[in-house]
Each structure stands twice: as structure tokens, then as C-alpha cells.
Image (cartoon, rainbow, N blue to C red):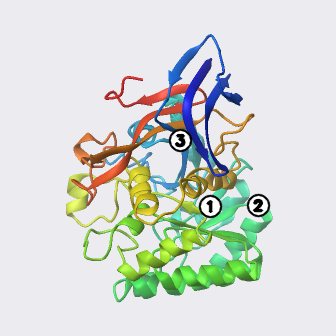
Amino acid sequence: MELLIKNAKVVDCYGSYLGDVYIKDGIINKIGRNLRKSCKTIDAKGYVLMPSFVDLHVHFREPGFTYKEDIESGSRAAVKGGYTMVNLMANTNPVCSSMDTVNYVRGRANQIGLIDVHQTVSITNSFDGKDISHLDRIDNSIKIISEDGKDVMNSKIMLDAMVKAKEKKLILMCHCEEENLSKYDMRIAENIMTLRNLEFAKITGATVHIAHVSTQEAMKYIIRYKDEGTKVTCEVAPHHLFLENECNYKVNPPIRKKEDVEFLIKAIEDGYVDVIATDHAPHSKEDKESGAPGISGIETAFSVCYTKLVKENGISLEKLSEIMSKKPSEMLGVKKGKIEIGYEGDLVLIDLEAKYNIDSERFYSKGKNTPLNGVEVYGDIIKTIKNGEIVYSNNKYEI
């Protein structure tokens, strides 16, 4: 399998240039100008070619909740959004606490064949909040453990889990929320548990990743601990960058104040945010009307972030590529996220000048739940390429 992409503006975390990219047997084989190959060729003049995106925080709901999403619909949504790898959360049914469930998910993803999948394993067995013995039975293909959707309330258990994570060289991803305070004040609930989890990371030396940071206080804690040398990374979700608390759409953590949004963007500029991750959380219409928190966001993430961060706040496209492609790839230990010889041929072709209005009825995801319907954004995904094969093509473009 060969593919030549010509005349593109090539952009990754290291810079930009006009050039051609040749992919052979799924790997970037040559980069240059005026390359000639007898193979399928795309003339990408006027468009931007970037490494495809890697999403560190996704809910595809399978097994157990396939009326909300399944691995096939989620995979199709991912490639439409320019993603070729996702990290799936463990809050399925059954909870992903065993290699049997991991292998089921992997098998389904491989059968569909559109994207690569890493399946997270729960911190406690079946989210019981008490037992971490199952972590001794997972193999070294597991990179991340998380209780996402909740936090581990018992501090001794969380401390033990971090010790175990360090021993097994796992990243422990934290959904920071003190449940006993959630009904009282979600802001305090996030801030208190962020501080606890950071302190435990410092004490144990574990590698900890803080999910969907939404408050300026939580980000300030992260900055402090990063500066002290604690092994901590963090992510911000597109909706926490684009929306402010005049929007009363239910997500967890909630949409925050303008001051929080501004501080998160400053943290991106200053290099403290490692990853933009969608927390793609599709729901049925009935579940959303019943109060289920979450946004279906994987199809709109690039456009939302490009519009907010690059167009409105002057953050470079190279920085966006770093936190949407390079860093999440490094965390998952995969050779993606750069346009470089020897890296996987996972790329996305984008029309940065195109603007469109978000329409959830056109989502590939089963989840149509978004507060962004009708919002105008820039940056239309033209093609998504996985291992040198086109896995998504926007049919309004002729190339």
C-alpha cells in the first residue's frame, strides 16, 4: 500500500513547510519536494497536512451501553474528527477490570479496523473503591488505569494504587472529584481532590495524569507541582476552553467561569497543558434529558480548538499539534504524532479556511448531545489517513 500527498502545507509540533509526504507499507517513507511515485496521489495544494489526532479520554460505551455508542460508531466519529487512536475509559458494563474485557474491546476495534484503541483498566476492581488486586493480573500492554467518571474516595486505597502504578510503570489517570462535596460545590470538589492526588503523586513518585482540568485553582496546583518536579501531566477538554458558565449544559466537571477559561488558555500558552482530550461522552436523547452529564465532542474537537485557540487567541498551529497529537502519542507509547520518516502514516488533511456551522444531526456518533449546534467554527477535516489508507473523506471536496 502506497500513498503520495503532494503540495501540502505540512505542519507538526516542530514547524511548517510546503512539501510532499510519501507513505509506504503504513509508514512515512519519504518527505520532500517534487516527489514522484507511481501510486495513489492526492494533490493537497491549499490545504494543511498534520499528524492525525490522538484522544486520551474517550467513552465508546461498549460493552454494555451500546445504545449510547459502540466501537463502530465511535470509530467512525473519530476518523471524521481526524483521530486515528483513542484511549477508552473503563466505565462500561462490565467495568473493564480484566484482560478478558480488554481483549474483547481490542478484538472489536481490530475487526472494524478504522482506528487504534488503547483500553484503560479501572483502578479498583469493578469500581468497588476497595480492591486493587486485579492490577496484578493485567499485562504490560496496559499503559493507563483510571476510575474515570468518579474518583477513588478512600485515600489509603488511592495511595496504594499509586504505589502499584509506579511498580507496574502505569500512568494513573485521575478524575478529581470529592463526591461528598459534589452536591454542595463542584468547584471545591474538583480542587480538593486535585490537591490530594497531586500530593500522593509527589509522595509515591507515581506518574499521574489529571483529567479534564476545569478550574484555575486546580491548574495552579498542577503548575506548582510540575515546577517542583512531580511526575504529573494534565489535559483540558475543548468544551472547557470554548464555553463559559452562561452555558448551563450539564457536563462533569461543569462549564466554568470566563476567568477559568482564560487561565486554562494561558496555561496552554505557557506549556503546562500536556494534552487536549475530548472526554467524548455520547448519550441517548432520553439519558441526556434525564440529566446525564457529557458532550459528544470527538467530531468537532479540532475545529473548536482551532477556532478558539489559534484564530481567537493566537496560539500556534504547531502548539495545537503538540497537544493533540505528539504528547498523547508519547504517553501511549506509539510512534504517531509527528510527520517524520519512520513514523506511522497517520495523517489528517484540513481546510483551515473553511468555516461551517456545527450540526449534531450530521454526527457519525450515536450521541447527538452537544450545546454547540449552530455554532460557527473554522477548520474542516477533508481526509483522515490511517497507515497510508484513507479512512475518512469529506465528500464535498473533490481531491
The image shows residue 22 at horizontal and vertical percentages of 65, 25
Q: Is residue 232 left or right of residue 185?
A: right
Task: Relative to 174, say whether 328 is above or below.
Answer: above
Residue 331 left/right relative to 47: right
**Label 1 with label 2: CB-CB less than 8 Å:** no
Tell which of 135 and 388 is nearer to you: 388
Residue 231: image location, x then y, percent: 72, 72
Pick out the residue farthest to the right: 167
Give the amino acid type for the residue marked by disc 3 in the picture.
Val
Front-lying residue, 292 or 248: 248
Query: Which residue corresponds to the image point at 36% horizontal and 45% vertical from the top-left?
Result: 69
Q: What is the distance, in whole Å, between disc 1 and disc 2 at their CAs?
A: 11 Å
Seen in the image, is 142 located left or right of residue 396?
right
Residue at x 59% of width, y 21% of height: 3
Residue at mark 1: 145
Q: Quadrant of residue 327?
A: bottom right
Say which residue label 3 marks.
105
Q: Earlier in the sequence, mark 1 or mark 2?
A: 1
Distance from label 3 to label 1 (Cα)? 15 Å
- Residue 369 visible in this rendered orientation of the protein: yes
Height in image: 151 above or below 95?
Answer: below
- Quadrant holding the C terminus: top left
Select label 3 or label 2 by which is in front. 2
The quarter of the rendered structure image containing the N terminus is top right
Question: Is residue 197 in view from this perspective?
Answer: no
Image height check: is 264 above or below 40? below
Q: Amino acid at mark 2?
A: Lys
Residue with the mark numbered 2: 169
Say how many tags the image has.
Answer: 3
- Report the residue at 29% width, 69% height from top: 250
Task: Name which residue type carries label 1.
Answer: Ile
